Image (cartoon, rainbow, N blue to C red):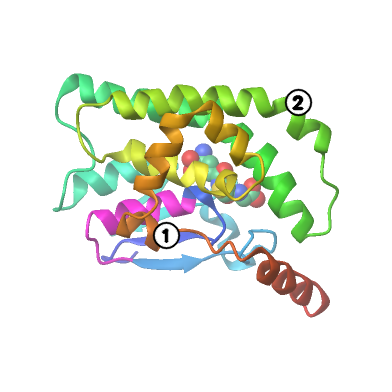
Amino acid sequence: MSKRPKVYGYAASTYTRMALVGAEKKGLDYDFQPVASWDGYDKDPEYIGLHPFLKVPVLEHDKVRLTETIAILVYIDRAFEGPHLTPSDPLALAKMWEIISSTISYAWPYWVPVLATNRLFNPMADDAVDENLISSRLPEMCGAAELIGNYLTARSGGFDLADIVVARSLKYATETPEWHDIAKAAPRLAEWWESTKTRPTIAKHMPDTDWQQRTEDYASRKSNP
Ligand SMILES: N[C@@H](CCC(=O)N[C@@H](CS)C(=O)NCC(=O)O)C(=O)O
């Protein structure tokens, strides 16, 4: 394994992007190895054995191989020199985990698999859009957004892993028409997003969201596999 940290993943993956922002924020000299097409549909057979559940990201560093984004982020924070990505104050640390756990449990499943998949990824692949699922789950999307916005803006410390996890989980939702309703229900989250999305390390690892271009790339890959 490489002495240089190496992150395996693919471009559209929100979890991969969290690991990359962490590596970037820490100032790491690292490599990125794509293991699937942009959208993750076409897996590279060479990397099938990398993760027990065929997921990304995976981090390799020297003799260490890690799966699970949060474990990877904690390792990046503690194993290397650089700015701290986790607070030392016990309450601030607990609050950081509260935000991360709430985002992964109550927000990400609606913002990404329900909203982004139907609004952004399915049209790209010419798959059906489940309008009923989107509208019936809008209250959960808004409720989670309000909760997380309140948590984020009530913190006393600065940027930490919670900002990385929320920013990467939210990005696709902000590209959908439903963001208007979500932002209205969660003004604190919307305000936090406006100031966070332009932070250099966050902005550097935004997934490419030129949807027309992505759709054309997808179609051309399908016709010339
Ligand atoms: N619990 C995992 C979840 C990772 C995950 O779901 N990754 C998605 C991409 S965002 C993935 O690998 N999907 C590929 C697939 O399911 O085929 C983690 O925290 O790293």
Q: Dot 2: what SS?
A: helix
Q: Is residue 63 visible?
A: no
Residue 123's quadrant in the figure?
bottom right
Residue 77's quadrant in the figure?
top left
Judge: label 2 CB < 8 Å from ligand 1.
Answer: no
Q: Which residues are magenta?
A: 16-30
| Crowd around label 1: few <14 · some 14–19 · many ≥20 (10 Å) | some
Res 136 label = 2
Q: Dot 1: what SS?
A: loop
**Depth check, front residue: 43 or 172:** 172
Magenta-colored segment: predominant secondary structure: helix
Instruction: Find residue 192 and report its horizontal and vertical position in percent.
Output: 37, 38
Q: Is residue 191 left or right of residue 44?
A: left
* Type of amino acid at the residue the image marks with label 1: His
Instruction: Find residue 125 and report its horizontal and vertical position in percent.
Output: 78, 60
Instruction: Find residue 26 and report its horizontal and vertical position in percent.
Output: 23, 54
Res 205 label = 1
Q: Quadrant of the C terminus?
A: bottom right
Q: Earlier in the sequence, mark 2 or mark 1?
A: 2
* Type of amino acid at the residue the image marks with label 2: Ser
Residue at the spot x=18%, y=52% of the render? 80
Is 198 above or below relative to 148?
below
**Depth check, front residue: 125 or 209:** 209
Does the segment drawn in magenta span residue 24? yes
